[in-house]
Amino acid sequence: MAETAPDGWTDAEQRLWEAFRQGERLDLRTGGDAEDGAVRGGDWGAERTVRAEVLARLLLHGPEAAEGRVASLRLVGAYVTGPLDLAGAALSHYVELQQCRFDGMLFLAEAAAGTIRFIGCLIPRLEASRLVTEGDLHLARCTVPGGVRLTDARIGSDLLLNLSELGSDRHGRALAADGASVHQDLEAERLTAHGGVSLRTARVGGRLSLRGADLRATGPARNCLDLARISVGSTLYLTGSLVGGRSGAREIQGHGYGAPSDPTAPATPFRARGGVRLVDGRFEGACLIANAEFTLTDRQELSLSRIQTPELRFTCPTPPDGPVSLSRARVGNLVDAPGSWPRHGRVRLTGFSYESLRPEVPFTVDQRIAWLEDSLGEYRPEPYEQLAAALRRDGRDDDARRVLHAKQQRRRATLPAPARAWGLLQDVTVGYGYRPGRAALWLLLAWLLGTGYFLQHPPTPLKPDERPTWDPALYALGKLLPVVDLGQNGWNPDRPGQWAAAALVLTGWILATTAVTGATRLLQRT
């Protein structure tokens, strides 16, 4: 293999040939920030121009490495002309391009590589469906006006898109990575996407982080983020990001592409301008939605239907302005706040199950019942029973009974008039069995009224020749508890007294019947 560059190569290309053999970085920057920016820099002349075919020649049929060196392609600040077509290629060399400006598309479809890093580059479009890498794929700080396609790609380590800006293709997609597999982490922190981000059926072995991302649905795309049927081995982050990065994070700053910022710096929220679908997603660590803003229009929603995760955190500073669906989702801990949920029936809870409630701020049981009832278009018992069961598991039995009481009150409105009347009586007297103290209060009130009446209107003896000991309190109590003989049956009240006694007897039987009915219902639920 020749040790010198082919004839006809420019001075910059010859220098790149030698840098490739030595495994060294070739830096073509002039040193001025205003001139070296790949997107907003000035015009780059021939001294910084490298043809795409030269890069392909080096990677596919490049020279042997110098003795004691490992050949690699490391290029900084170059203007790459023409499309770089490496589709189907087997790339055995390390590839790293920083602050390079491409004027043609980059094709990596069905290629196989070790580690590929594009950092701060301008790339018109990246086509990399079914790309396979053994190491990382970095697209950090890049600008890709035509979007990125990674459909069915297999990334052996991390996929980084931090601080990049993506435009959309003709289908309105900025990142199309359906079916992709990332062995470790997928980070797209503070990503700006002018189009949909689609990771349907993707698999991420580690975490999926979209901290501080700004996603906007454009063109025909209705959703700005589609994670339907995704599997994440750790945690999904739809949260804010500290401006400038986070100390210690395995993101762009953690890999040496910028210094970590002060952790007390202000945060950039996660923003979604369009529908967000996490339908059927599996998140083994947690699903965190915090410091996030959702702007939804007609036919757009934040859908968490049928997700499964040990913890769902939903603590947005302002509620989404569209529907939030939790239908048939299954979570362990539900961490939320009263002000994070939309109102007016825009939360869907059909079949939503959770093990425990861990509100970030105080969330009273009355607020929780109002949250529940606001989400129900028509009466359904399951959401109430689910909430009561979660409260019981936390040892909050009184709150659980309050929820079940509210369930019966909501159910009463759906019944025919006679059943509603009977239900109202049960509610007033014993709170459907969940307020047994009410029966005691009603008995006490009836007993006091009866005692007062018969104290003023004592009856005559039933047998004139017998005069038992008269006690108005025991007489009134005996009428309220007709199955108990208190020795006051030998009296004959007048007609008004008979009506008073009948009222006491009727009151006693009604209270007893409603108490038994409520107790039966309560025992059936325990």
Image: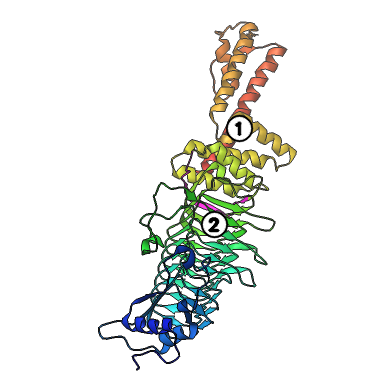
Tag 1–tag 2 contact (CB < 8 Å): no
Amino acid carrying label 2: it is Ala
Q: Which mark, residue 270? A: none
Q: Nearer the viewer, residue 139 or 514?
A: 139
The segment highlighted magenta reads 347-361
Mark 1–mark 2 Cα distance, whole angstroms, equals 40 Å
Query: In front here: 4 or 132?
Result: 4
State the residue position of label 1: 513
Where residue 379 sits in the image (x, y, percent)? 66, 46
Residue 470, quarter of the rendered image: top right
The reply, left or right, for residue 505 in relation to residue 331 is: right
Give the residue pinned by disc 2: 329
Q: Position of residue 162 (x, y in %)?
A: 46, 63
Residue 494 is a magenta residue: no
Q: Position of residue 312 (x, y in %)?
A: 49, 53
Query: Between disc 1 and disc 2, whose residue precedes?
Result: 2
Left or right of 524: which side holds 449?
right
Q: Can residue 481 be seen at all in this image of the molecule?
A: no
Exactly how many numbered labels are in the figure?
Answer: 2
When the figure is inspected, residue 9 is found, relative to residue 321, above or below; the finding is below
From this view, report whether residue 145 is shown above or below residue 71. above
| Disc 1 packing (10 Å; few <14; some 14–19; many ≥20) | few
In magenta stretch: residue 358? yes
Residue 361 visible from this viewpoint: yes
Disc 2 on helix, strand or loop? Answer: loop
The N terminus: image quadrant: bottom left
Left or right of 250? Residue 300 is right
Identify the residue at image location x=56%, y=10%. Answer: 471
Disc 1, SS: helix
Snapshot quadrant of residue 104 = bottom right
Find the residue positioned furthest to the left: 68
Where, by quadrant of the figure, is residue 462 drawn? top right
